[in-house]
Amino acid sequence: MLKAKIFTIFPEIFPGFLGYSLTGKALDEGVWTIETVNIRDYATDKHGSVDDTPCGGGAGMVMRPDILGAAIKANYSKGRILAMSPKGKPLTQDMVKQLAQEEEIAIVCGRFEGIDERVIEAYNIEEVSIGDYVLTGGEQAAQILLDAVVRLLPGVLGNSESTLSESFEDNLLEYPQYTRPTEWEGRKVPEVLLGGHHKKIDDWRREQAIKTTQERRPDLWKKYLDSKRV
């Protein structure tokens, strides 16, 4: 069972969309759990302040190390601690697989201009980014990360083989998918998918995955080629 602990100033946001569909069913069945810690509970003034102006000047506010540090110290003692941040390491499927093996993870949801660097250093926090863009806070990003992780937990998807041909497996994007009806508005399902010849189907899907990756993600295509040279 995976235990997820979220440090946030908006605990009411969770579980959010994670409470629905397969992740919600898994949550109800105890495959994973989620607990929120309200960082404001560790504020030291009557206003519940958790931030202050950045040292050296500049726009925005920074989450204070004494407040966030106290919240972490009181609620977390083991496992990996992540912080959602646009300057973090990109979230990849390989990282998701690693996190799915953990028994417990914590995620810090930053706000404002970010969190004081000293907290990151003190608690060996791993900064993680879900893309090259900026959100209003880390809560949305944390839910995306958890969705990717929870779906890999045993029993969540039902058919574990369904993850083997997904995008990013073997550094390739997924091939195109089709279903019934076999013809829709003049567009037909490729004949190879209807013939029942599994080897030809596998070859076609591989070719399509390679083509899509070359066209859309040359960075992944390079990784794929490099992996084959090893």
Image: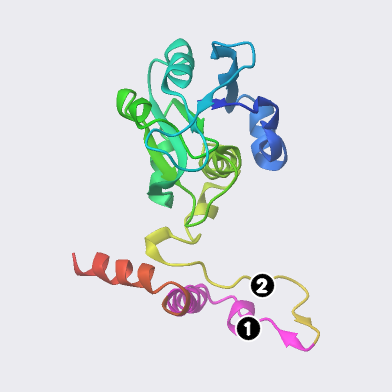
Nearer-N-terminus badge (2/1): 2
Q: How is the image coloured?
A: rainbow
Residue at image coords 59%, 21%: 35
Horizontal side, residue 10 vs residue 102: left or right: right
Residue at image coords 71%, 42%: 21
Residues at marks 2 and 1, CA–CA distance in whole angstroms: 9 Å
Q: Residue 169 location in percent, x, y?
A: 42, 59
How many residues crowd mark 1 within 10 Å: few (<14), some (14–19), many (20+)?
few
**43 or 221: nearer the eye?**
43
Q: Residue 193 location in percent, x, y?
A: 60, 77
Horizontal side, residue 218 vs residue 40: left or right: left
Which residue is labeled 1 in the image? 190
**179 or 152: nearer the eye?**
152
Res. 31 mark: none
* SS type, badge 2: loop
State which quadrant residue 123 falls in.
Answer: top left
Identify the main secondary structure in magenta: helix
Q: Are marks 2 and 1 in contact (CB under 8 Å)?
A: yes
How many residues crowd mark 2 within 10 Å: few (<14), some (14–19), many (20+)?
few
* SS type, badge 1: loop
Q: Residue 198 location in percent, x, y?
A: 51, 72
Q: Residue furthest right?
A: 185
Magenta segment: does it hold 193? yes
Image vertical order of residue 178 relative to residue 32, above or below: below
Which residue is labeled 2 in the image? 178
**19 or 116: nearer the eye?**
116
Amino acid beneath label 1: Pro
Q: Is residue 214 visible?
A: yes
Specify the segment rendered in magenta: 186-213
Amino acid beneath label 2: Tyr
Q: Residue 51 location in percent, x, y?
A: 52, 27
Q: Quadrant of the C terminus?
A: bottom left
